[in-house]
Amino acid sequence: MSRVYNFSAGPSMLPEEVLKRAQAEMLECGDSGMSVMEMSHRSKDYDKIIKGAEALVRELMNVPDNYKVMFVQGGGSTQFAMVPLNLATKHKAADYIITGQWAKKAAAEAEKYIKVNKVASSADKTFSYIPKTTAKDFSSKDEVDYCYICYNNTIYGTRYTELPQTEATLIADISSNAMSEVIDVSKFGLLFAGAQKNLGPAGVVLVIAREDLLGEPMEGTPTMLTYKTHADNDSLYNTPPTYAIYILKLVLEWIKEQGGIAAVQKVNEKKAKILYDFLDSSKLFKGTVVKEDRSLMNVPFVTGDSDLDAKFVKEATEAGLVNLKGHRSVGGMRASIYNAMPVEGVIALVEFMKKFEQENL
Amino acid sequence: MSRVYNFSAGPSMLPEEVLKRAQAEMLECGDSGMSVMEMSHRSKDYDKIIKGAEALVRELMNVPDNYKVMFVQGGGSTQFAMVPLNLATKHKAADYIITGQWAKKAAAEAEKYIKVNKVASSADKTFSYIPKTTAKDFSSKDEVDYCYICYNNTIYGTRYTELPQTEATLIADISSNAMSEVIDVSKFGLLFAGAQKNLGPAGVVLVIAREDLLGEPMEGTPTMLTYKTHADNDSLYNTPPTYAIYILKLVLEWIKEQGGIAAVQKVNEKKAKILYDFLDSSKLFKGTVVKEDRSLMNVPFVTGDSDLDAKFVKEATEAGLVNLKGHRSVGGMRASIYNAMPVEGVIALVEFMKKFEQENL
């Protein structure tokens, strides 16, 4: 056995150092005499872990003091309901930009509760670009409670490089680019990220929200889907996903050791450049996204021949480069190269692609 | 360092064999070349894990074929909303028996959506007993959609030994006694259990529900709080808490190796008898619960002197018997002796209590 390069879109690779630390502490963490999984969430030992995780989020992302940091459950899909239920209480309306399946799902869930204005969409070209918008495309802050975007689109491999010029509070799903690049938290009302891409294992969602937005939700909102419940109780209203938060903390410590998010971003830009440069020069493979909107995290590409795509995925798997099959809505291949993917992994992929190209062109 | 006997009410002890297996597989599980935490929830490797977990639930609990087994997020507290939102769609009313804080919270959450009849309560004596009821205490099935109980009360240390004679569908929170004693699933419409006591780590809830109950929920129910969403997608509508489900599967394999739930129940009865027999003979300590309703899992006891209680907890901790402090609403001590607590742990506790009694009486 040996560890593979795992290009999964999520859950995805974790830093080997993190896994080794978790392995070493599995039966006894520190001098607690127990596994983190066995710790009461109300114990002093666990309190250090969850408070430590929050402190690292604040430090690494430079979170302003008037923002709450929360760890909640239910994935991004639960956020799709929590955002309108908690934040659209005044105008009961919001703008959504449709840049892929996840933005579409978020909008559909919001439509259960509020008026949704789909102000822009890139559905016409299989979401292969970020729609260009200007200030006048958006509703005023007297008409909507917020404007919602998906910052990086995991399936389609696009990302925002400039934020939309909206007057209303900006809300973003940052599940697939959280802590992979510097994000100015102060430009947003609320950010959320499922951990299973850049932050840790599945089962915990990081939410960062401006305090003044966390008031009473719509009537009938379940207690557990009320941000205030979690904000007022430091994510300890009920038992949180304790072990997932512990792993998240180890991942954040690793990011800090790498030099923080700006340093990690440089490595990510280097990794992405290696792969995109090859795609741009290749005679067999080509990227599916317009150049200016290319994601640093998710890189879809195709040969144009679905049989050849399948052959590539199969042979890559045999070579220890796994989970390269593209999403069914795009086809072809997708390489997700999150923080934990080392530069060596991307180089190995490109070398393999070169060899495959020579053999199959 | 050495492992302690951890009497925490939850999260709580896990079998050492399970932790060792998780430790061994942390960097590479099977021939996958990756940690379970890194596996795509859509991969073949992970499919074996989640399907294996479901099969073990069905086998161990003898789940009838017309029941769905689901793994969801959000803890019991989210179930408090999901139960009425999904199951009280016809009469918009339900009976609740109030046997402690968790039943009370469940009823309060249900009151947001439906008429709640509190048909019985043991609040008058700090929930130290299970209220006796007869068939005529309950609403008819033409008046309510279900009757809700908390099967084992973690905080107060009581449990049902006979189920209430209700005509309406019985729903039970079995968070603290799931798989610790044989439960006849066919007597219930829905059972749920937060994993962090007998089944695994925090962050996953096991739900077992009769298929015909899983129809359309009330209008406005979030997609993620709709049982049908999870039932129709084999708990893979979105990314489930993959690692928590993996550990749960290892715990169920361990239960099977012990001889199944009936065999584990025998050990639990033996452990409880050792502790209760000592409490009944002690001149210093006494149990707080009426004998016939005593829990096999959670054993609250007091000396009657809060200073002495504090001294006991402190000295026990120093002796490696940890998390014995009682819940603030009962005071004194509480020993939670879930499946993973070995008989030796209970014997060590009783020996320590005897010594403390000699020194302090």
Image: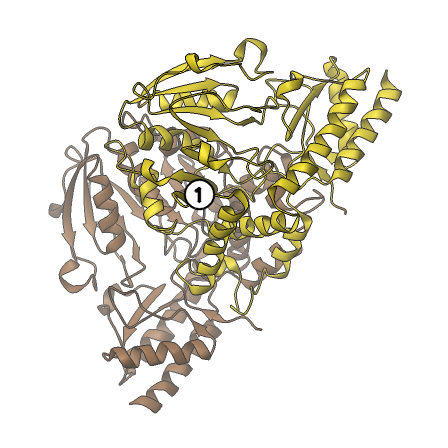
Chain colours: A yellow, B brown
Residue furthest to the top in view is A124
Name the image quarter holding the N terminus of chain B: bottom right
> Residue A180, percent across and down?
60, 37
Residue B354: x, y in percent? 37, 85
Q: Is residue B46 above or below residue A103?
A: below
**Residue, disc 1:** A64
B133 vs B307, left or right, is: left
Establish if B70 lies above or below A119: below
Q: Is residue B270 left or right of residue A219?
A: right
Query: A258 or B194, which is in the foreground?
Result: A258
Query: Which quadrant, please, contains the C terminus of chain B?
Result: bottom left
The residue under label 1 is which amino acid type? Pro
The quadrant in which residue A196 appears is top right
State the residue at coordinates (53%, 69%). Answer: A33
Give the x, y percent position of residue A45.
Answer: 47, 63
Q: Residue at x 26, y 26 (%)?
A: A90
In the rendered structure, the answer to whether residue A344 lies left or right of residue A87 reads right
At numbered mark 1, what does the secondary structure look like: helix, strand or loop? loop
Q: Position of residue B351 (x, y in %)?
A: 41, 83
Q: Dot 1 falls on which chain?
A: A
Q: Residues within 10 Å of mark 1 (few under 14, many from 20)?
A: some
Say which quarter of the image contains residue A354. top right
Any part of residue A288 in sight: yes
The number of callouts visible is 1
